[in-house]
Image (spheres, grey):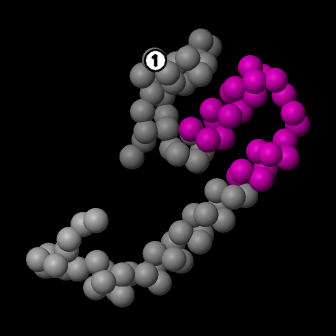
Amino acid sequence: MFDDSRSFVTRAFLRAEFELDYRAYTAAADAELLKRLRDWDGRLRLSETQAEGAFTQTFFVETWGYGCSIASSSHFSATTWASGCCSRRR
């Protein structure tokens, strides 16, 4: 466990100052993610290869903010993600 006894700002202080803000932030973010997961679970059942593009769009692009420089290419697929040309947008 991290020893913050010599730190300028302790965990207890940070927790006291930011706990309510953090809980409000995570509640909103978690609600959005849970809705996306429920929607994904309720979708039409497709084979793994049929669902590949929708999964990539839903989770990598919309949820985690990843983008790809060749996303407009007709050869774009999940292998493109694995090849390393795609990265998270900041």
Q: Position of residue 29 (x, y in %)?
A: 57, 64
Q: Is residue 7 left or right of residue 40?
A: left
Q: Secondary structure at mark 1?
A: helix
Q: Seen from this angle, which residue lies furthest top?
A: 75
Going by the numbered disc 1, the residue's amino acid type is Ser
Task: Say if the magenta span includes residue 42.
Answer: yes
**In which quadrant is the N terminus drawn?**
bottom left
Q: Is residue 70 visible?
A: no
Principal secondary structure, stretch drawn in magenta? helix
Q: Which residue is mark 1?
A: 83
Q: Residue at x 66, y 65 (%)?
A: 31
Q: Residue at x 59, y 22 (%)?
A: 78
Give the answer, above or below, for where 57 lies relative to 48: below
Q: Position of residue 21 (x, y in %)?
A: 45, 80
- Segment colored magenta: 36-60
Task: Classify 10 Å Cα crowding around label 1: few (below 14), some (14-19), many (20 and above).
Answer: few
Task: Say if the magenta span includes residue 17.
Answer: no
Q: Residue at x 47, y 84 (%)?
A: 20
Give the answer, above or below, for where 74 lies relative to 23: above
Give the answer, above or below, for where 70 lies relative to 24: above
Q: Is residue 20 left or right of residue 73?
A: left
Give the answer, above or below, for where 90 lies relative to 48: below
Q: Is residue 34 left or right of residue 82?
A: right
Q: Position of residue 41 (x, y in %)?
A: 80, 46
Q: Residue at x 49, y 38 (%)?
A: 66
Q: Seen from this angle, which residue lies furthest right?
A: 44
